[in-house]
């Protein structure tokens, strides 16, 4: 049985996976504090900031990308906008 992810908000978390976790673990913790209350409505992936995909998105630091286009470098901004993004997809 496969789980449907089409209705979920797509969230990609970009951090330098090839660097020491001490470089990005605080960022991940802050972002997951914001995402966790909505996790059942989110399909998330952790991706390497030092990848071709990240270069194409013009990412230069730890970042969360929602639906492949909306970028957040701050947990504060993500926390503020996440409910609106979920409402737009009729997930709240």
Image (cartoon, helix red, strand yellow):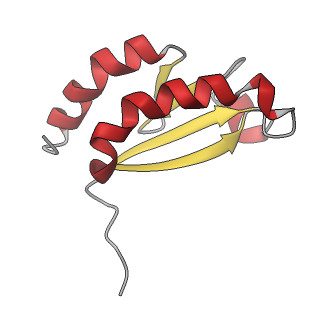
Kindly indicate the quadrant of the structure image that contains residue 91.
top left
Q: How many marks?
A: 0
Kindly indicate the quadrant of the structure image that contains residue 89.
top left
Asked if 1 appears above or below 8 in the picture, the reply is: below
Q: Position of residue 65 (x, y in %)?
A: 50, 31
Looking at this rendering, what residue extends furthest in the bottom direction? Answer: 1
Of the pair 82 and 71, the residue shown nearer to us: 82
Name the image quarter holding the C terminus.
top left
Name the image quarter holding the N terminus.
bottom left
Q: Is residue 78 left or right of residue 7?
A: right
Name the residue: 72% across, 17% down: 60
Q: Is residue 7 left or right of residue 16?
A: left
Q: Is residue 59 left or right of residue 65?
A: right
Q: Position of residue 42 (x, y in %)?
A: 35, 48
Q: Position of residue 9 (x, y in %)?
A: 33, 45
Kindly indicate the quadrant of the structure image that contains residue 87.
top left
Q: Position of residue 43 (x, y in %)?
A: 41, 52
Asked if 89 appears above or below 2 in the picture, the reply is: above
Asked if 58 appears above or below 85 in the picture, the reply is: above
Looking at this rendering, what residue extends furthest in the right direction? Answer: 19
Name the residue: 86% across, 32% down: 20
Name the residue: 20% across, 25% down: 84
Of the pair 58 and 3, the residue shown nearer to us: 3
Q: Is residue 86 left or right of residue 44?
A: left
């Amino acid at each position: 049985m496969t789980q449907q992810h089409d209705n979920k908000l797509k969230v990609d978390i970009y951090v330098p996976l090839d660097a020491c976790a001490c470089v990005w673990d605080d960022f991940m913790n802050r972002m997951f504090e914001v995402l966790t209350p909505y996790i059942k409505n989110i399909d998330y992936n952790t991706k390497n900031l030092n990848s071709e995909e990240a270069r194409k998105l013009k990412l230069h630091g730890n970042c969360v990308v929602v639906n492949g286009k909306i970028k957040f470098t701050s947990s504060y901004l993500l926390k503020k906008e996440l409910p609106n993004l979920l409402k737009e997809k009729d997930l709240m």
